Amino acid sequence: SSSSSSSSGGGFGGGGLGGGMSSAPAPSPTIDSTITEAEAQADMTFSEGEADCSNEELPTFWLDMCARIDTNTSSVVNLVLNPERYTGYNGSHVWSAIYQENCLVRTGTADNICYEERVLYRLLSGMHAATNVHIARYYHAPSKRKGREDWEPDLPYFRRQFDGHPERLKNLHFAFVVLLRALARASPYLASYAYVAGVSASEDASTSSLVQRLLDSAILRSCAPAFSAFDEGLLFREQQASWWSLKKQFKSVFHNVSTVLDCVSCQKCRLHAKVTMLGFGAALKMLLLPTELLPTSSSRDEIVAFLNTLTKFSTAIHYVKELTALQYDQYFKAQPLPSPLGTNVDAVGAVAPTAAAAAAAAAAAAVA
């Protein structure tokens, strides 16, 4: 995916689903803003158009999904130099505000949750899970004193976030399916897009080639059965009162959640949160707009964010498997050797060490 973005903020660093904090020393949350002159020039060559998005009956209604996620072309950030990992920031209060904003005002009981609200909640929960997986995988910074040459995972953090919460990993997979559906629908447009990073002509050609490989991938085609986990065609079919617009409420909630990100004081945390929300917004536009509008619907920032968000969720799913395997290794190393006469080794081996491992297996099976 593309490696630079002009989003102005930074990833939900440490806060986690449970909001717990560790006493581990935190690295600096400051963004590395290093870019080359060629990259800066390339970013300045892109401009965005405007359209009237107020009339929900018009096909252009969804064009401003990303309008509340401010980007600043005077501050371009190379995402390769700013990977998502532990920063020490406790973002639990921000997550609480985000979930509170995910409410479509309507008549009826508190349990009367519509399909659209469930989709929003699962996307946000999936984003939360992906963030925590990355934090768990890259938690302990390199330290000569402690003999760490690279970033190392924190399995207790991983357990705290996912033990007893299989729905969090299921929502991680659900959000990934939504992104894959958007990728498949927008494939013709993405295949012809001009991927100019500003590094060199060979780098630009390599980027285009990699995107083409992704779009033509047999693996992507093999994922088609999993796409049934979400169908954008089911959105906004409910009969509505004349005074209430489900589409406008949906867009308003997405905008409100995006605005909450400005409350994040950690730069790197805000950066990754905004990139993910921008990626979600781009994906929703790819799914909800008519296909003939796709070539003019997304800005460069949105394409960059979409591809990086797709990468974030893909790697998070990979890290879940990696961390779960480490959990298994740690669990069995801690167990006493079985008695030759009194213990059935197969029976011991069949016991799942953590709920997170079981949840990962169940979630993977759900989308396999």
Image (cartoon, rainbow, N blue to C red):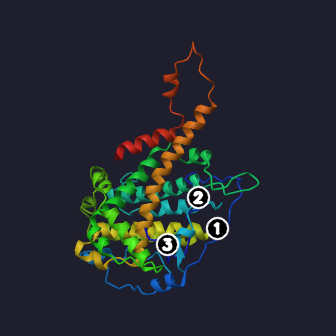
Q: Which amino acid type corresponds to the residue marked 2 in the rendered image?
A: Ser
Position of the N terminus, as image quadrant, is: bottom left
Query: Which x, y percent locates residue 60?
Result: 28, 78
Q: Which residue is mark 1?
A: 29
Decide which of 63, 345 is in the foreground and name it. Answer: 345
Q: Is residue 349 above or below residue 324?
A: above
Give the mark nearer the N terminus: 3 vs 1: 1
Q: Which amino acid type corresponds to the residue marked 3 in the rendered image?
A: Thr
Q: Which residue is mark 3?
A: 259
Is 68 situated left or right of 20 in this image?
A: left
Can the viewer see residue 107 in this picture? no
Query: Which x, y percent locates residue 307?
Result: 41, 67
Q: Is residue 64 above or below residue 367?
A: below
Position of the C terminus, as image quadrant, is: top left
Is 246 situated left or right of 314 in this image?
A: left
Give the mark nearer the N terminus: 2 vs 1: 1
Q: Which amino acid type corresponds to the residue marked 1 in the rendered image?
A: Pro
Is 208 situated left or right of 235 in this image?
A: right
Is 129 situated left or right of 250 in this image?
A: right
Please tell me whether mark 3 or mark 1 is closer to you in this view: 1
- The CA span between labels 3 and 2 is 16 Å
Can the viewer see residue 277 in this picture? yes
Q: Residues within 10 Å of mark 2 (few under 14, many from 20)?
A: some
Determine which of the numbered discs, if any, sits on residue 21 in the image: none
Q: Which residue is mark 2?
A: 92
Helix, strand or loop for disc 1:
loop
Q: Residues within 10 Å of mark 1 (few under 14, many from 20)?
A: many
Query: Which x, y percent locates residue 221?
Result: 28, 55
Query: Which x, y percent locates residue 219?
Result: 32, 54
Decide which of 188, 176 is in the foreground and name it. Answer: 188
